[in-house]
Image: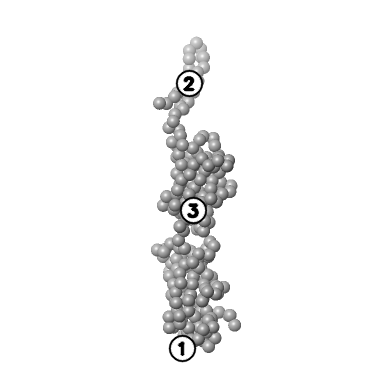
Amino acid sequence: MSKVVLSTALLLGGVEVVAAQHASAATNSVMSYVNVRDEEGLNANGAHVVLFDGDKQVASAVTDSNGRASFDALEDNKIYRIEVEGVKISNAYFKKGNDLNVAVLREALPSAPAVVANTAGATFTAHVINKDMQNVANQKVDLYDITAGAVFYKSMMTAADGNVVFDVPAGRNFAVYVNGVNQGYTLRGVEGSKLENTFLSTRKGKANITQKHSLRQYL
């Protein structure tokens, strides 16, 4: 039941209502939201968001597929501190009724895949040859997503022509490893692009290359 508090004033022998304030339990149902995204602006699904009053935890919620954590029944005139997956969000203060956006590094988010597999992107061809300019088969080529940290993406073995072709998503940065050795080469997927580079192996090859590749200056 709503409680009505009336303020009155005496005016010319009569009574005039000058203010009416409604205090109701319904005010506690005002929704408040924290929207969590990674450094690329992608929604963070399943992230645990906790609100603190000082050092006291007062509420928690998990983000939905839109990266949104919803809170109700927060107190009026309180300022809350935010943590996402145990990470304190600095310079972000939250009040009842707010709709606040926060960014968290992707590596701190739960169950974050290395990349979104169905993201349209580019192809990357790695050519592996030796000092004799021979194609080298059966060389292990690994890609690591280094957009935020270093997350393993995919591993493939070169074919008889020394080539291996990866599909990579747009907007991500990758480091290339050949037989476990970082090649010092970074690629970034741009939608629709066809990327390639040649890397040197000390292994024996079987056939001299017939196509000129842009051998990087390792020698």
Which secondary structure lies at badge 2?
A: strand
Percent x, y of residue 215 = 53, 81
Splitting the image into 4 quarters, where does residue 120 fall? Answer: bottom left
User: Looking at the picture, does residue 10 appear above or below residue 75?
Assistant: above
Which secondary structure lies at badge 1?
A: strand
Residue with the mark numbered 1: 207
At label 1, the amino acid type is Ala
Residue with the mark numbered 3: 37
Residue at coordinates 46% horizontally, 37% vertically from top-left? Answer: 73
* Front residue of this view, candidates 196 and 84: 84
Splitting the image into 4 quarters, where does residue 80 fall? Answer: top right
Alpha-carbon span between mark 2 and mark 1: 94 Å
At label 3, the amino acid type is Arg
Q: Nearer the viewer, mark 1 or mark 3?
A: 1
Q: Nearer the viewer, mark 2 or mark 1?
A: 1
Residue at coordinates 51% horizontally, 12% vertically from top-left? Answer: 12
Residue 6's disc number: 2
* Front residue of this view, candidates 11 and 20: 20
Q: Which mark is first along the chain, 3 or 2?
A: 2
Percent x, y of residue 79 = 55, 39
